[in-house]
Amino acid sequence: MRKYWLLFSQTVTIALALLFIIHTLKPELLPNAARSGVVTLYQNTPPTNDDTSPKMGMSAAAQKAMPAVVNIYTSTVIKNPVNPLLDDPRFKFFFGDQFDTEPQSSSSLGSGVIVSPDGYILTNQHVVEAADQIEVALSDGRKAKAHVVGSDPETDLAVIKIDLPGALPAITFGHPEKARVGDMVLAIGNPFGVGESATMGIISALKRDHLGINTFENFIQTDAAINPGNSGGALVDENGSLIGINSAIYSPSGGSLGIGFAISANTAKKTMEQIILHGSVTRGWIGAGVQELTPELAESFKLGETKGVLVTDVIRHSPADQAGVKTGDILVSIDNNAIDSWNAMLETVANLPPGNTVQLRLIRNGAAISLQVKVGKRPKPVEQ
């Protein structure tokens, strides 16, 4: 018996030692369940409704957050179109080699936020989408080359990664769902390439959508100055915690007019986690277009107090079409989640895992019906 016990103990010891070595040196060899712990994120404890704890103050918030915000410099090689006349000997006889056909390069700048001590950086997709080379400058003066882990055009978010020795200063994620209009915020980034800067303002509005900027819009509006170069930078609260990724401004002149938009940190976190684990984002899709019900439409359909959205389009052979959804139906809920706006329908469906079956509650010709729909995978957006 003792012999078998010793053999068992030695086997367990060797297995644990191998697992430790693999986890330390080659974590990518572990299955996805283990890999999900490779990326370390910092997140605040959710505040309570009656939380009256004092804030740390804006200067302390800036000192906490700014080391985690980086400057991003990208360069793109532009290849000049080659005209067949340039290879014609007669053309060269008259004009020589004065026409330059060598590739040219252009550079641009933006900002990013370190989200993990391992070197993962969150930024805007439009900052890095056309880049051939990406260089990241940290607030302590260090610089490093970066590569794109993945991007999501429908939220205009991307994740890049740098490799530097030691743990990097990572941002702490806040709770934008607790934010209120009038709260003080800081926008941190690299405006116009002048260097890392912080501007102060308030939250002007929440849950801004229908702006035509992204497919999935849930913007925090702020009057903190956001200028070209701030894209991908951090919008932080009075505790220095991330509540948004600076993304866009409203400005005919290109400068700040006090109307800036940041992607909610909740949206950014969900998108980032999928990109880090899978390299891309997978969303649910049923293939139905909707519009919000106006009072006139509600009256014409004799809906009374019923909430919902009007189905205006059903794509042929889509999950909605196969389930029997028809144009003119009123979609009331999806798996008992009330749908009262176009944005709510889009977000609810996008968060459904493809392959799952869900129940749609609809009103058709004044009668309530239920349909079972098998969720599909959202197609990739068509490049413009």
Image: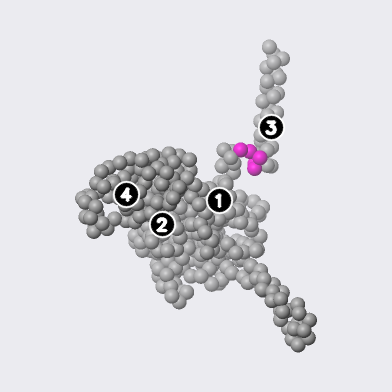
Q: Is residue 287 magenta?
A: no
Which residue is label 1 attached to? Answer: 280
Image marks 3 and 1: residues in contact by CB distance under 8 Å: no
User: Identity of the amino acid at label 3?
Assistant: Ala
Q: Is residue 209 visible?
A: yes
> In this picture, is 213 found above or below 320?
below
Q: Which one is in front in this view, the residue at disc 2 or the one at disc 4?
A: 4
Sequence-first tag of 2 and 4: 2
* Label 2 – label 4 distance at C-alpha: 26 Å
Nearest the camera: 81 or 143? Answer: 81
Extreme top residue here? Answer: 1
Secondary structure of the residue carrying tag 1 is loop
Nearest the camera: 22 or 3? Answer: 22
Which residue is label 3 attached to? Answer: 17
Which quarter of the rendering shows the N terminus? top right
Secondary structure of the residue carrying tag 3 is helix
Which residue is label 2 attached to? Answer: 218
Nearest the camera: 362 or 80? Answer: 362
